[in-house]
Image (cartoon, rainbow, N blue to C red):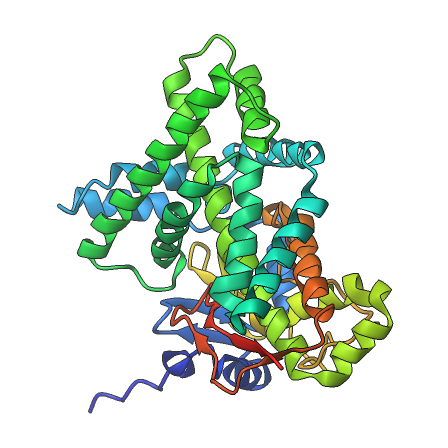
Amino acid sequence: MMQAREPDPLDALTPENRYGIYAALRANRPVHWSACHVGWVLTRYADVAMILRHQNALALDVLSGMQQLHARGGPALPSLVEFCASLSLLTRPPRHAAIRRLLSAAMGGLRDLDLPAMLERKAGDLLDRAASDGGINLADGYARELALFVIGAFLGIEPDDLCRLGGQARDFMVVFERSLPSLRVLRQLDQTAHAMMSYFTDLITRRRRTPGQDGLSLMVKLAAEETAGMETNGSDHALAACCMFFFIAAEETTSAAIATAAQIVLQRPELRQALTDRPRQLAAACRDLVRLASPIQYVVRTMSVDLNLHGVHIPAGEPIYLMLGAANRDPDAFSNPDEPDLARDGPEPLDFAAGPYRCIGKALALFEVETALRKIIERPRLALSPDPPVWCDRMNVAPLQTLNAYFE
């Protein structure tokens, strides 16, 4: 008789119950073969940090999977392939290092923007309008608006284009989920990638003709120096894909971090009062709040060599899901891990990953969270609504969609 497959606890994972499931896996199955992920799942901080920094750990080879799908008669997905080929998160050396150099250098463009003052004004305006209206959705109406504003300012995107691009970015996030989308969804993703890359290709052409004081103008200049004497069309497409990734990552993950951090603070009056009394501790508090929020729940790696971990053999090339959200609440790494700590010491949280694929935008994201929370704390009459929050049903980047608040 055929033995029934042992249930996979990750089949039942939701944004509301994920930390309880992570805790059970950390304690009982630190190396877990997940049928729904079709890969190995690691949940302990030490294991996740080790793989993130391991010299033999590589990004998941998504391009080969799409090429094999096309070879078996599936759609070609040219724009999706082009995007993934230029995505620092999915590329391997030496291309990965070249893309990161460009993106890191482009972050220097922030120095030419008066971003702190701009973001302070934007956050204040949103909350002032909410006070007049009587309430606000701190997820879509505040966190998302702030994240869109910052990445729009960085890339020099016209305000009228931000809403449309933001909607496309949200639709595109399914590409980072655990399960392979249907062919219909893959075709839709390819169309979305084509639309976004076409927009950024046109914007790049305009910036080349008329540079501005923004990060995209700097990226165009840097890319031109690296490809001097080469045809620009191909390099423009690669640069457009970088812009698309920058936009999606900065908007989706940062808005998720801001909304969850706001929820944690507004749910804890004693924490809110402590930050009101000791505002200089806000920066440290934000680092711990983002640890709790873990806007990216997991990243995927493969090993170029076999790995033995906790008595389990993991063959080279098989997907390994590194559960950042679980590692960041590991009691062996963080004391009282499910609560914020204004003076927390210990290891570096993994919310922005670590090692060669560490998030380039970490400092910018933390700055946005800090500014967003400061403006909330300055308004003592702002309180969470009794309406239950609503989470996005994605599993990886799964932000709050609704977090209603009102002015008492």
Residue displayed at 59% across by 32% down: 215
In the rendered view of the protein, which quadrant contains the C terminus? bottom right
- Residue 119 vs 262, above or below: the answer is above
- Residue 359 vs 14, above or below: the answer is above
Q: Residue furthest left?
A: 73
Residue displayed at 70% across by 71% down: 379
Q: Residue furthest bottom?
A: 1
Q: Residue furthest front?
A: 132
Q: Does residue 194 appear to the left or right of 277 in the view shown?
A: left
Q: Does residue 235 appear to the left or right of 291 in the view shown?
A: left
Residue 350 in the image: x percent, y percent? Answer: 65, 62
> In this orientation, does residue 244 appear?
yes
Residue 171 in the image: x percent, y percent? Answer: 34, 55
Residue displayed at 55% across by 53% down: 147
Q: Does residue 272 appear to the left or right of 201 in the view shown?
A: right
Q: Nearer the viewer, residue 162 or 93?
A: 162
In the rendered view of the protein, which quadrant contains the N terminus? bottom left
Residue 309 in the image: x percent, y percent? Answer: 57, 69
Marker count (numbered) = 0
- Residue 280 vs 156, above or below: the answer is below
> In this orientation, does residue 304 appear?
no
Q: Nearer the viewer, residue 74 or 210?
A: 210
Q: Does residue 197 appear to the left or right of 94 in the view shown?
A: left
Q: Residue furthest top?
A: 229
Q: Nearer the viewer, residue 116 or 96?
A: 116
Residue 65 in the image: x percent, y percent? Answer: 30, 48
Q: Quadrant of residue 113?
A: top right
Q: Quadrant of residue 360?
A: top right
